[in-house]
Amino acid sequence: MSKVQRKSEICLNCDTPLRPEDNYCPKCGQKNDSHKIPIKHLIFEFVEDLFHFDAKLWNTLKASFTKPGKITLDYLEGKRARYVPPVKFYVFVSFVFFLLLGKLSDHAVDGSNKLFKNDKGVDSKSITINELQGKKRKYHSNNPNDVGQVEFEYTSKDSLKKTLSHLQRATDTELNQLLIEEDIDTTAQNREALKKYSAYIPENALSLSDKPSYSVYGKIKFATKEEYDRFRENIHNYTDAQVDSLLKAKGENVNWFNRQMLKKLGKFDTKNKDDLKEVTHAIIKSISLTMFLMMPLTAILLLFLFYRKKYYYEHLIFSIHTHTIFFLIFSFILVVQIFISDRIGQKLWPWSLLICLFYLISSLKHNYKQSWGKTIFKFLLMSIPYFFISLILVIVAVVYGFLA
């Protein structure tokens, strides 16, 4: 579709006289288009630009996944018009990725049952069968059918006793629901094991404290809710001397880190889902910013290891393209986990990491044109500093995101 260019006799930006053949102003460079454009032309132009972008995006995705490293080679050879520019591509994909990551974190906070309010506004907690039997809680068991991971929610010792008593006469459907929630196979063997586990729980294991505790950081605990609420209300106005005095009185070391943690945690209620979401979003935003540092740092590693390409920008373009594809793969997993099935999404993460590993090695091979042996060896050399650099940056990002 050809664009209908409606020219003006003077530049609308700087009033410079223009000739009919002038497509751009010779003084300021603005395109010679009249501001009086029919609605029909605007619609045609929008559709054309949309399909033009879609074509570039399709070409970029097709080349990226069918021939790893090709878009970098083409870009460095000057074949750039057919692809989305590297930085623009990265910004678009990373924005989608971190947006989805934030949405997943919100789902995790909303679905958390470690500490929440029930319909009557009473604090409720959860405990596993392993904990009730005096064993250490297993958050990540190597055995996928460990029924000891099953959690029970309770508001008091009596409510927990009733739950366990009901378990002994629960139907297969009810038992299956408990197993499904913990991602455990709903077999007859696991249902029997669940009943047997609960029967072995001793009476003294139910000596749970019904008295709620209020703590902020380390040993900073408060005897009553009123005292806790008063502290959280006034922490905004505490001086450093007052914070240090409180740390000392509670037996904590007086230093800058403990002072900052107490100030921030005092303003942040772990029982409030909105507070949890706010902090999580701040940390995710901080991590997204550190990724801009990872790409140039990765390019430096590539420059030292793959010195055939002697210019730094060549390695930087490769780094941008590779990180973008990684985020694209991770975004796909997040879409599955959020909108289709959380259980399926979690199982896809190991596969996505494996795909990224093979993709990176293949991209290195085709872009730097070295043997498979040299490529894998240099990849292993690069992965060690890359891991430690990324780990340090993530830790800094988490701490900064929380404290900021």
Image: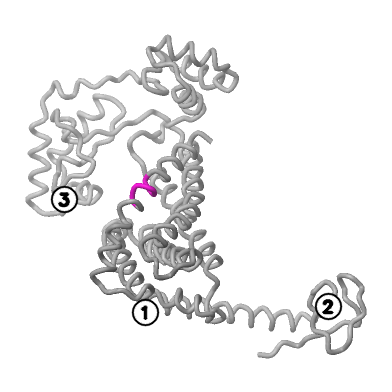
For image coordinates 37% across by 79% down, the residue present is 67
For image coordinates 39% across by 57% down, the residue present is 301
| First of labels 3, 2 by sequence position | 2
Tell me if mark 3 has few (under 14), some (14-19) or many (20+) residues whose alpha carbon lies within 10 angstroms of its own.
Answer: few
Pick whichever, 288 or 339, lies toward us.
288
Q: Main secondary structure of the magenta part?
A: helix
Residue 236 among magenta residues? no
Q: Quadrant of residue 121?
A: top left
For image coordinates 33% across by 56% down, the residue present is 342
* Image side of residue 361 versus residue 90, left or right: left
- Are circles 3 and 1 on residues that touch, CB within 8 Å? no
Please, what is the three-letter code of the amino acid marked with disc 3? Pro
Provide the residue designation for mark 2: 25
Q: Secondary structure at mark 1?
A: helix
Tell me if mark 2 has few (under 14), some (14-19) or many (20+) residues whose alpha carbon lies within 10 angstroms of its own.
Answer: many
Q: Which mark is residue 144?
A: 3
Question: Where in the figure is residue 136, as x and y percent of width and height?
Answer: 17, 32
* Image side of residue 253 versus residue 147, left or right: right
The mark tally for this picture is: 3
Q: CA distance from mark 3 to mark 2?
A: 69 Å
Question: Where in the figure is residue 215, as x and y percent of width and height?
Answer: 39, 21
| First of labels 2, 1 by sequence position | 2
Residue range corresponding to the magenta coloring: 387-391
Q: Secondary structure at mark 2?
A: loop
Q: Secondary structure at mark 3?
A: loop
Q: CA distance from mark 3 to mark 1?
A: 36 Å
Provide the residue designation for mark 1: 66
- Are circles 3 and 2 on residues that touch, CB within 8 Å? no
Question: Where in the figure is residue 386, as x and y percent of width and height?
Answer: 36, 53
Please, what is the three-letter code of the amino acid marked with disc 2? Cys
